[in-house]
Amino acid sequence: MIDSTIIKQAVNDSRDGISIADMRQDDFPLIFVNAAFERLTGYTAVDALGKNCRFLCGNDRNQPELALIRGALFNGEFCLVTLRNYRKDGSMFWNELSLSPVHDQSGALTHFIGMQRDVSSRILLIHRLRQQKEELQSDNEHLRILNNLDPLTGIFNRRYFDNQHKIQWNIALRSHLSLSLFIVDIDYFKQYNDFYGHLHGDECIRTVAKTLGSCLRRASDFVARYGGEEFVILVCNITELQSDVFAEQLRLRIESLNIAHAKSPITDCITVSIGYCTFTPQLGMSSRDFVATADEALYTAKSSGRNCVISRRCETQT
């Protein structure tokens, strides 16, 4: 047998708080606390003895861990929880509390031994790491968005178009919906840039991009900067006739901006050439051919005098 004096010294020298609750009395009062409990909580033994240990929670009684503690006490079972406790001075600390039941020789529950440990630094570290992870995820999402945007205009870039048009293509195939692609090119933009300067050139591109974006009506439709002074617009589920009307509306909207272009051989303001193609799944062509067909239509529009719209029908590939 170990001398009781040694056991008492070990309990009092423990770095963890130790308390004992009498389960045979009403409201399960504390009948023992060690010196570490006093240091941890700021409550002396005189303050704590005779009270239910719930006083350490103050008014913070909505913690889900308290229900776990009540269940363990009722069933006479071991319990390990981490919950918010409050010192005598009101300061909060995270208490890792383990509760161990004590039974007499007949098996009746007589006491619960509680071990308290301040794990505030660990919990704060976990919270800090979680916050840093959320911030990193937010930064990564922000970076992902930036990677899909054109820095000059703020609209989507070529990378986004290449990915998105394949997605829209597959949706059109599965759902038997039409898909229309419009490629828009600013007429004689090099001459504009050379005459007015790059700052005006950049502003012209931004204005055209904003105007094209304002013509879209559905969330699934989008405009992207394809490169230089070229833009692409992808529109789902419109007919060829509706595509014709939409393309002409785009051309007229840009022309109506009346952006002066003294070096244009066709008119005195900025204009655009548009090539477009409307695809239906029954045609059986590939997405690459779809883009190539719209690009061929744009080439024809530019070689036909510019400031016009030209469509090309997708041909079945064999």
Image (tube, helix red, strand yellow):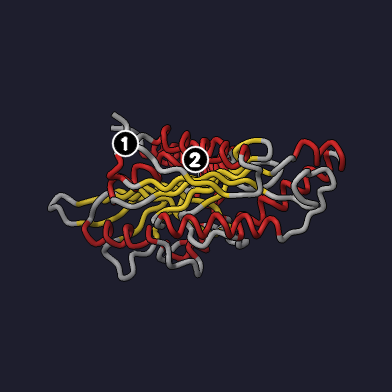
Horizontal and vertical percent for residue 317? 32, 31
Q: Which quadrant is the N terminus positioned in?
A: top left
Residue extending farthest top: 318
Q: Residue at x 47, y 37 (%)?
A: 291
Label placed on residue 294: 2
Name the secondary structure under disc 1.
loop
**Contact, CB < 8 Å: mark 1 with mark 2?**
no
User: What is the spatial separation of the Cα atoms under label 1 and label 2, in whole angstroms?
Assistant: 15 Å
Residue extending farthest front: 304
Q: Residue at x 54, y 54 (%)?
A: 247
- Of the residues under marks 1 and 2, which one precedes in the sequence? 2
Position of 94 compared to 199: left or right?
A: left
Position of 198 compared to 296: left or right?
A: right
Q: Is residue 216 visible?
A: yes
Q: Which quadrant is the C terminus positioned in?
A: top left
Horizontal and vertical percent for residue 82? 43, 50
Position of 200 compared to 215: left or right?
A: right
Q: Is residue 135 visible?
A: no
Name the secondary structure under disc 2.
helix
Horizontal and vertical percent for residue 121? 56, 42
Label 1: how many Cα within 10 Å (few below 14, some 14–19, many 20+):
few
Which amino acid type corresponds to the residue marked 2 in the rendered image? Ala
Which amino acid type corresponds to the residue marked 1 in the rendered image? Thr
Residue sitting nearer the eye, 305 or 103: 305
Q: Residue at x 41, y 33 (%)?
A: 289
Q: Residue at x 81, y 48 (%)?
A: 261
Residue sitting nearer the eye, 71 or 276: 276
